[in-house]
Image (spheres, rainbow, N blue to C red):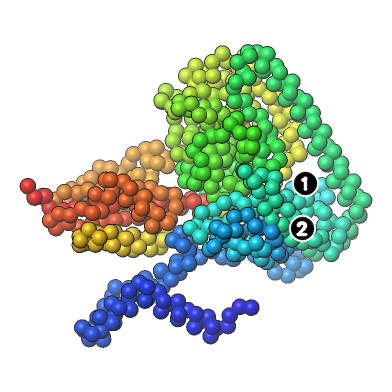
Amino acid sequence: MSAGPEERVRALKQLIEHHLNSTGVTDRIDRALRERDKDKVIQDITREDVVDRVITELKNSSLNESLLPEQPEAIPHNLLPPELETRGKRFLQVSLTQGRAFIDDLENNEGANFQLHALCFGKRMRSKPVPATCDPNFDETFYFCLDQIQKQGGLLTCQSRLLLTVVRTSHAGHKQLLGSCEVDWRRCLDRPEGTQLNLEVTGTKSDCGVSVGLLSVRIKILPALQKRISSEVLKSQLTMEHDRKLERERLFLMYTKQWWKEYLALRPAHSDRLVKIFTEDELGITQMVCMMVTPLQSPLIESARHAARFVSQIPCTSTQGCVGNSTSEQWTSLHGFLVANCGDVETHCLLLCSLLLGFSLNSYVCVGSRVKGNTHVWVMTLSETGLPTFWDAVTGQRYVNGDTTPYKTIDCVFNDKSFYANAQPSNSISKTKFDLQDPVLWKGVSEDAIQSMRASKDSLNMKIVLDTNLIDPHHTAANLEHQLKKLIRDEREQHDLGTHWNENLSHLLLPAISAYEIERAAGVTVGNEEFEQAVRHAVPTGFTFKGYPAQFNHLNIRQIFRECMRSEVCSDLITSHGDELELAVKIRIYPYPENVVACWVMFACQYRCIL
């Protein structure tokens, strides 16, 4: 039962009182009242925006330093449709109740939460976060509109499935894809009252195939179908589709076995090459790698380089590709990658290749090795003349033809329609020719065979729609700056150093940060001359200027400060001492879809040189 207004007011008063005491504001006000007139103190409080800062910090106090804005209980397209019967629309209602037996890693669940993400017909929804317990209370209902499905051939023949994914967020804000389950929603078509299901959530990576919990789900069509589909018809349809899928997979497997024999017959050394035709997704289902890629278009991504910048800012859990190194290797689907907001090198490449295909670029995922010798995956685009450009999906770095690249060998390339294995005597990048249509140089898998496999895939769920970033970049940056200044002041006090801020100098750091982000995103350098001129004009004659920029893909200010202090240059700047020394700091946040950010922090100082 929710608390009443009086209880909420009382709780808010207690929270404010605790915050004022813990931050020392109460003590400072008491000292000021003893030393000065009451009206004067009130004027000082108003002028310094103390109340506004307290309110701002309270809004973020429960976010464990992540400083994300308060999230709605459900994303906009997750809202309850009013008056279902009178709107003339039909919906698939998915009601989540109790989760059970989520016993994995219980000792580390203090302060953590679970969030359930649903995908069906290409539409994404998510539940409100709930405490990470053994039996999480997922009390949520999703509504998926069926009108478009009915127009495209009817409910009975729609093979789009309902995918449910559980994500765990730790006390520190780190996300983990806990597990997923998939169900054919058409199991409710023959039951007007709906179908109650107990679904097993299977783990990922090392827990692949292992149950990590159970979900109680009820699915129902609203309003009910006027003409009920019989159980016999439904069973016949599902059996027919299942048999067709098995037959396609059987024929494709037979084809690829013969294809592999032919590839090995070309040259015995081909057996040592990393030709990866199959992988396993987070559901533990074996997939042909081409099925993991699909052209994606989003109004939130403006160009190919913008796409590369966006993908590079998604945290990477491993910088080394694991292709061919483990029998348990697993590639996460695009949906799993986005809801977890982190992933391996492979998943970064799958998303970047899909976005580049959406811009009609001739894009491929490449499998090979780096100069350092370890296996690796990256992305390639080919020009009309066959010249390759390599894209590092984790860093966003591009390597055009003629550049020195970190890649040593290339063994196969693929996208949503094609798969090619390098059939040349040498797989060295420097010696490989990229005329993929030449069967002497590259052995391709039949595009018809690939298309036959795609026919049984859930095409609607492959068309992922990117979510808008909900972060207010300017408000959040100002809040972070306030906290960072306090951390710097505390650090300098430990060295018996005073702290004086130069707000004008802080403002002048913005052009430099803007130039850094443009350089990372577009690969061009702009604005350096204006920044240098501004610094020369603002810094007095005889003073020395020092600056240090750093960029992060998260908003945890304490972690940012710790990482900066590990740099000797930054640490020396923050603890600088000198005649008339003044410090400056500026934070700028560049938002990307899916709440992905590029957070720039720049420190600076100026002081008088004494010879």
Identify the residue at image location x=50%, y=29%.
374
Q: Which residue is mark 2?
A: 198
Question: Viewer-proximal residue, 408 or 402?
Answer: 408
Classify mark 1: helix, strand or loop.
loop
Image coords of residue 163 (percent x, y): 70, 51
CA neighbours of label 2 inside 10 A, class few (<14), some (14 to 19), many (20+): few
Q: Which residue is mark 1?
A: 159
- The answer to whether 571 appears left or right of 554 in the picture is left
Q: What residue is shown at x 25% (from left), y 84% (from top)?
A: 33
Residue 346, compared with residue 151, is above or below; it is above
The tag on residue 84 is none
Name which residue type carries label 2. Asn
Q: Nearer the viewer, residue 76 or 610?
A: 610
Residue 233 as seen in the image, left or right of residue 473: right
Relative to 187, residue 294 above or below: above
Figure quadrant of residue 410:
top right
Which numbered disc, 2 or 1, marks the residue that appears first in the sequence? 1
Residue at image position (64%, 16%) is: 439
